[in-house]
Image (cartoon, helix red, strand yellow):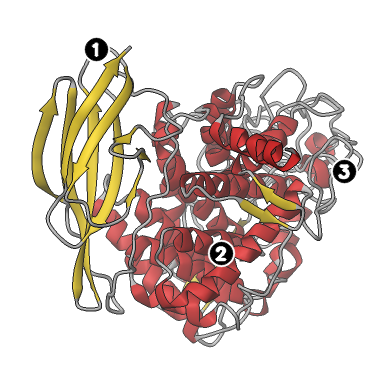
Amino acid sequence: MKNFASVAALLLLLCFPVAFSGHDYGQALSKSLLFFEAQRSGVLPRNQRVTWRSHSGLNDGKSSGVNLVGGYYDAGDNVKFGLPMAFTVTMMAWSVIEYGNQLAANGELGHSIDAIKWGTDYFIKAHPEPNVLYGEVGDGNTDHYCWQRPEEMTTDRKAYRIDPSNPGSDLAGETAAAMAAASIVFRRSNPAYSRLLLTHAYQLFDFADKYRGKYDSSITVASKYYGSVSGYNDELLWAASWLYQASNNQFYLDYLGRNGDSMGGTGWSMTEFGWDVKYAGVQTLVAKFLMQGKAGRHTAVFQKFQQKADFFMCSLLGKGSRNIQKTPGGLIFRQRWNNMQFVTSASFLTTVYSDYLTSSRSYLRCSAGNVAPSQLLSFAKSQVDYILGDNPRATSYMVGYGNNFPQRVHHRGSSIVSYKVDRSFVTCRGGYATWFSRKGSDPNLLTGAIVGGPDAYDNFADRRDNYEQTEPATYNNAPLLGVLARLSSGHSGYSQLLPAVPAPVVVRRPMPIRKPRVTSPVRASGPVAIVQKMTGSWVSKGRTYYRYSTTVTNKSPRALKSLNLSIKNLYGPIWGLSRSVNSFGLPSWMHSLQSGKSLEFVYIHSTTPANVAVSSYTLA
């Protein structure tokens, strides 16, 4: 009976949603996006919402004969560091890819896409030749000597680059990942731009893979601030993962299969994920490919990737063989300086992995036993709630959210009176004397910024000179976009994993993008409309397989409480519906189909479309 009760409890966790309440995740999401506008460099657009900022860095790249105007300042300084900027864009793009519908429901999809494009427009400029990439503008040493607004900084704006003689596989690989991930985001809204990004991603990956080396050995001024401790193998695997997802090109899947062992993807058991160490992200993505049935002949290797992904997730839950440290208040703790970056990135991975496991009807396998995927989402929620104020200090570590948040942020732009309010020149060292040393609150609210956060004992000192705890960073916020969007939606309508087997056989270079064509006319049965599309095809072992996407829309003014579909002439796997003996119904996570809303399911077989019809339905 005890074993039966344990199984029953686990099934309940799988079947019933996590309760989301207490915080306004939608508001936090909106605020977090404003922070990226405060970090913009270059000519600010007319729709700029952070109005205390103005144009800056307008001569960046000029001394090197290249236009490097634009991009993001990484944190509280005025340097443009390429590696963390690229990771920021990759994570924003991943958030949109997984939770675009939820971002749209919160009215923030457009702002998210704008934030991504601000970064990718800069990367296009920074990549003027296939084997040249500019990876930094300005340097931390001279910049940190001064405390000035970005609009009038007098510090050195030298541009630093990598090329075949001075390689940087980690920098080029991460930038390739950012471009590839972003190409997915723009595929429908701006297909020409999407193809341009993918072209840059191909070139950058080839550059990174052919001319191998650590970027901080070439751009030495970066080593003190964003040194590549993990090397470049993780970025090469990371870039290959994103290029496969963006292009469906078998070459990149094979790259992961051939190099997973030798490059550490299947060997490293990780307890962190961030701008330097990408292994946990790679392991999560490859586990997704495995769940999608895309591994093919690489199944054995991809299973080892997934085992390492499981290890990372279990370590966060405290159910692994080596668990990550947590503060007494429950926040994961990796290091004193900007610990929050690891909190947000880990929360994102647990969020997507929870959804991957749920949609593939799988469990998380930990050394302490099988764990329901809902526990991963609960963990992410606990970390976000801590950030937003559920902690021993009752402090929100997101500036502008709640009633008690940091007032003296380690950030040049926010701590000095706006250039639009007072254009009196702030000198390099004068800024320290007049503004940095002030005890008062920042004159400009850095809305949405996630600061470095508390120490290992939940202690926090709100002082401008306490850069370890009060400095924000773009890569703190980027992973949080997806998590906040997911939490704001509860358990309704998250992006389901849509497996596709067998893996397509394609050539080295990308296949032309083909628009899906309708292969079955709209079929209506009362208030239910059904339309099918063939969205892909490939040949495997001499047989042609077709992927069909079927959309079921509720045309009634009332909600559909139940729906039974009859599907005949189906000769392959199907995803996105619950199955009974003789029919198919709404997926287990969807309790009803609201008026005007649609659900999508996918199936694969090697013939013409199956016959999909409505057997019965019940209106609310």
Q: Is residue 321 left or right of residue 3?
A: right
In this rendering, is residue 229 above or below 378? below
Residue 114 visible in rendering: no
Task: Work out whether residue 277 or residue 476 is closer to the camera in this orientation and state it.
Answer: 277
Counting from the top left corner in percent of width and height, residue 371 is at 67, 47
Which quadrant is home to the N terminus? top right
Which is nearer the eye, 381 or 32? Answer: 381
> Earlier along the polypeptide chain: callout 1 or callout 3?
3
Q: Residue at x 37, y 72 (%)?
A: 202
Q: Amino acid at mark 1?
A: Pro
Measured Cα–Cα span from mark 2 to mark 3: 28 Å
Farthest residue to the left: give it.
Answer: 521
Q: Secondary structure at mark 1?
A: loop
**Mark closer to the observer (2, 3):** 2
Sooner in the amino-acid sequence: mark 1 or mark 2: 2
Nearest-to-viewer mark from 1 and 2: 1
Identity, as a three-letter code, of the amino acid under mark 3: Asp
Q: Secondary structure at mark 3?
A: loop
Question: What is the CA distance from the residue labelled 1 to the residue labelled 2?
Answer: 44 Å
- Residue picked out by circle 3: 455
Residue that badge 1 annotates:
557
Q: Quadrant of the C terminus?
A: top left
Q: Position of residue 282 (x, y in %)?
A: 56, 64
